[in-house]
Image (tube, rainbow, N blue to C red):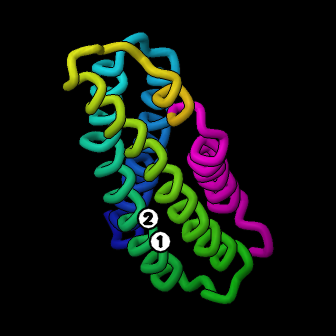
Amino acid sequence: MSTYDWLLMIHVTGAFLLVGGGTTAAILNLRALYAERPSEVALLMQLIQRVAVPAIGIGSVTTLVIGLWLVHHAGFSYGTFWVWGAVILWVVANALGSRGGRYQARAGQEAARLAKEGGDVVTPELRTLLRDPVGNALSYGSGLTLVLILILMIWKPGQ
C-alpha cells in the first residue's frame, strides 16, 4: 500500500467515526425525547457523552489533519473551492454540534437531578429542555453540515 492509500484509509476511518458518532448522538437524543422516566433520559445523555462525543472528537480531528495532509500529498491546491468549502463547513459543523451539545448536557443534568431525587417522573421543565428548538436545530444543523462535507469530498466541484 502506498502512503496515499494509508492516508485515505485513515481519513475515511475518521469520517466514519465523525458521522457515526453524530448519528449515534442523534438517535440517542431522539430516543430521549420519548423517554418516560428521567433516569432513562440521564442514561441516554450519558451514552451521548461517553460514546458519541469521543467518536465525534476523534473523527473530527482525524478528518481535518489527515484530510489536509492528503490534499498536500495528492498535489491538490489548498486554494481549491472544495478544500476551503470543506474546511469552512468542518468549522461550522463543529461549532453547531458543540453549541447543541450544551443544550443536551443541560437536559441530562436536569434528568439526573430528577432521577436522584427519587421521583423519576418527567417534569414539564425537562420536556422543555429536551424539545428546545434552538438546541435541536443546532445539533441537527451540525449533522446536515456533515452531509454537505461528504458531498464536497465525493464530488470535488472545481477540481
Which x, y percent locates residue 47? 29, 34
- 118 w.r.t. 150: above or below: above
Q: Is residue 42 above or below residue 52?
A: above
Q: CA distance from mark 2 to mark 1?
A: 5 Å
Q: Foreground residue, 95 or 6? A: 95
Give the residue at mark 2.
Answer: 63
Q: Please name the residue that numbered disc 1 is placed on.
A: 67
Q: Is residue 33 left or right of residue 46?
A: right
Q: Position of residue 131 (x, y in %)?
A: 59, 32
Q: Secondary structure at mark 2?
A: helix
> Which quarter of the figure has residue 145?
bottom right
Instruction: Answer whether labels 2 and 1 touch (C-beta < 8 Å).
Output: yes
Does the magenta run of residues contain 144?
yes
- Name which residue type carries label 1: Gly
The reply to whether the magenta stretch includes residue 55 is no
Mark 2 is on which residue type?
Answer: Thr
- Magenta span: chief secondary structure: helix
**Residue at image x 40%, y 44%?**
106
Q: Nearer the viewer, residue 32 or 2?
A: 32
Residue 30 locus on image (x, y percent): 52, 26
Seen from the viewer's position, the closer of residues 85 and 68 is: 85
